[in-house]
Amino acid sequence: MLTKVFKYLFVINAIILASMITYGKLFVFRKRKPQFVSDYCATIAIFIAIYSILSIVFAWLMPTTNAKLIMLAFALSPFAIGLCATYHTEKYFTLIQILLVAISAIYVVL
Amino acid sequence: MSLDFEFIHEEGLNTDKAVLLFHGMTGSPYEMKKYGQFLHGLGYDVYCNCLPGHGDKVEEIYTVTYQDWIDYACSKFKELKSKYKEVYLSGLCLGAVLAIAVAEKYPDEISGIVALSTTLFLDGWRLPWYKVLIPIGLSTIERFYYTYPECEPHGIKNERTRAVVKKLLEKSEVGMSDFPMTCIFELLKLSRYVRNKNRLSNVTTPILFIHSEEDDLTSPKSAKVIYEGISSSDKDMIILYDSYHMVLYDNEKDFVFNTAGEFFNSHSKIKECVPC
């Protein structure tokens, strides 16, 4: 029962996070007023934090070691991407981030 | 239009002492101009240029690194040291941190430093409620999306001055109107670099810190950390009680100018300009 609840939370959070990053990249960042962008980014940061925490929770709940490691990798992925990305490559890493969030949601459901 | 300035005494008057000024993050030499003019009036040649990533090449603000700032500051200092007997440093905000970074490399070659509103930590009272999320913003892809908007009170307690500065910022004539997160990221990396205990203990240069108790961007903790870590025997800290971050423009600016001038004069062995 608890696993199901966390599953729903994770998937909803992942959908919101991926959508916000996509929408932000297309219509918000460097396009809207700085105060709005600031608040928008703060909201994304909250969802990234929730995403990482829920991934760690799932790493704990997963039955096999491989599954635990995969969930831990998802939990750390936003920070790994942040480490690797540069100003010139951030478009590609944004795409990778969105894809990873989507893949993690599918993985958790399956 | 270049915002750089140099106030050099006329040919034939050998001053032999210079002050190198460093402006703040996303600022420009414009914010140091009145201060520079004041010091020039006291007999110093004064130099101030745009830091890497600022001024005409504003798009570089997204790619500039803290090492670029340090390399620039050191090269500028060495250039002046080859021309003048005494070279002093003074900086505001990021500029103050850069002055300390130069002092860590050349502690015995700098005649003195005046550090204004030294910014090691972003812990001022005007930072928004989500400042606790800054570590997440800095360490993820968000670093490239987020800009912290320049907002009230713009580092100035005096309302009249604030209104003037606000108009200038809106026209982007004197600096950027917001802080890219990538720039903040580099400032915090510079802060970690400078705070290194081994490097900090190398500093033996005479230093005066001036910081506002009510600084809206960075608390006096920044200045205190450096003050306690350096090995200088000649060091002092002055806390202002009627100003915010931009101490060169606020209610106590005259006091700041005069105190800095007195500090430089008291450490100078060259008392006046002499004809060559």
Image: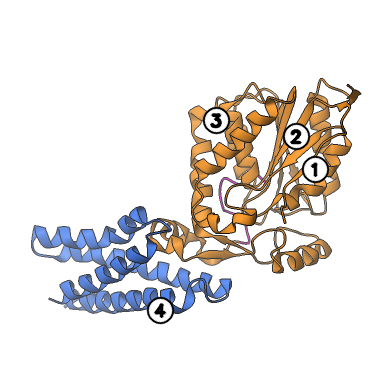
Chain colours: A blue, B orange
- Real-space Cα distance between discs 3 and 4? 45 Å
Q: What residue type is labelled 3?
A: Leu
Question: Disc 2 vs disc 3: which is toward the camera?
Answer: 2
Q: Is residue B202 left or right of residue B81?
A: left
Dot 4 and dot 2 within a common chain: no
The local secondary structure at tag 1 comes to helix
Whether label 4 touches label 2, CB < 8 Å? no
Please identify the dominant SS of the magenta region: loop
The residue lying furthest to the front in this view is B11
The local secondary structure at tag 3 comes to helix
Q: Residue B36, labelled with which disc? A: 1
In this picture, which residue range is highlighted in magenta? B115-126
Which residue is disc 3 drawn over?
Answer: B200
Q: Residue B187, labelled with which disc? A: none
Chain under label 2?
B
**Which of the 4 quarters of the picture holds residue B91?**
top right
Question: Disc 1 vs disc 3: which is toward the camera?
Answer: 1
- Real-space Cα distance between discs 4 and 1? 46 Å
The residue lying furthest to the right in this view is B275
Magenta-drawn stretch contains B119: yes
Q: Which of marks 1 and 3 is nearer the N terminus?
A: 1
- Residue lying at 52% horizontally and 72% vertically, measured from the top left: A37
Whether label 2 touches label 1, CB < 8 Å? yes
Q: Residue B19, labelled with which disc? A: 2
Height in image: B223 above or below B139? above
Q: Is residue A5 left or right of residue B93?
A: left
